[in-house]
Amino acid sequence: MEDDKEIRYYIDIDARTKKVLRWDRDFRANLSKDAVPGQVRIFLTKGQYSKLVNALK
């Protein structure tokens, strides 16, 4: 699918506590470019994201 190229998979982590805040996917155009203080966003490949979701089922 052409749209798949525009989807980004990510994990948001609290930098202070080192806890995962959320994991999600969204279209690149919808993601905020502004950094959130105290939060780190790590981008994943589609395969890495799928493994995470399957492991947590």
Image (spheres, rainbow, N blue to C red):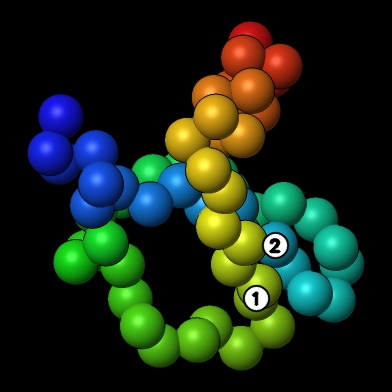
- The N terminus sits in image quarter: top left
* Residue density around tag 1, few if under 14, some if 14–19, many if 20 or more, within 10 Å: some
* Towards the viewer: 51 or 5: 5
Considering every residue shown, the one lying at the far right of the view is 17
Q: Pointer 1: what residue?
A: 39
Instruction: Give residue 8's position: percent from left, percent from top.
Output: 38, 52
* Residue density around tag 2, few if under 14, some if 14–19, many if 20 or more, within 10 Å: some
Mark 1–mark 2 distance (CA, rounded to whole Å) = 6 Å
Instruction: Give residue 23's position: percent from left, percent from top.
Output: 55, 45
**In the picture, residue 54 is in which quadrant?**
top right
Q: What element carries label 1?
A: strand
Amino acid type, callout 1:
Gln
State the count of labels: 2
- The C terminus sits in image quarter: top right
Q: Which residue is drawn at 24% across and 38% down?
A: 4
**Left or right: residue 14 compared with residue 24:** right
Q: Height in image: 38 above or below 47? A: below
Instruction: Give residue 19's position: percent from left, percent from top.
Output: 80, 56
Amino acid type, callout 2:
Ile
Q: Is mark 2 on a helix, strand or loop?
A: strand
Q: Height in image: 18 above or below 44? A: below
Q: Residue at x 52, y 52 (%)?
A: 10
Q: Height in image: 13 above or below 22? A: below
Q: Which residue is drawn at 47% across and 35% down?
A: 46
**Left or right: residue 26 compared with residue 40:** left
Disc 1 vs disc 2: Cβ atoms closer than 8 Å?
Answer: yes
* Towards the viewer: 45 or 32: 45
Disc sitting over residue 4 in the figure: none
Q: Pointer 2: what residue?
A: 13
Lower position in the chain sequence, tag 1 or tag 2: 2
**In the picture, residue 56 is in which quadrant?**
top right
Q: Residue at x 70, y 62 (%)?
A: 13
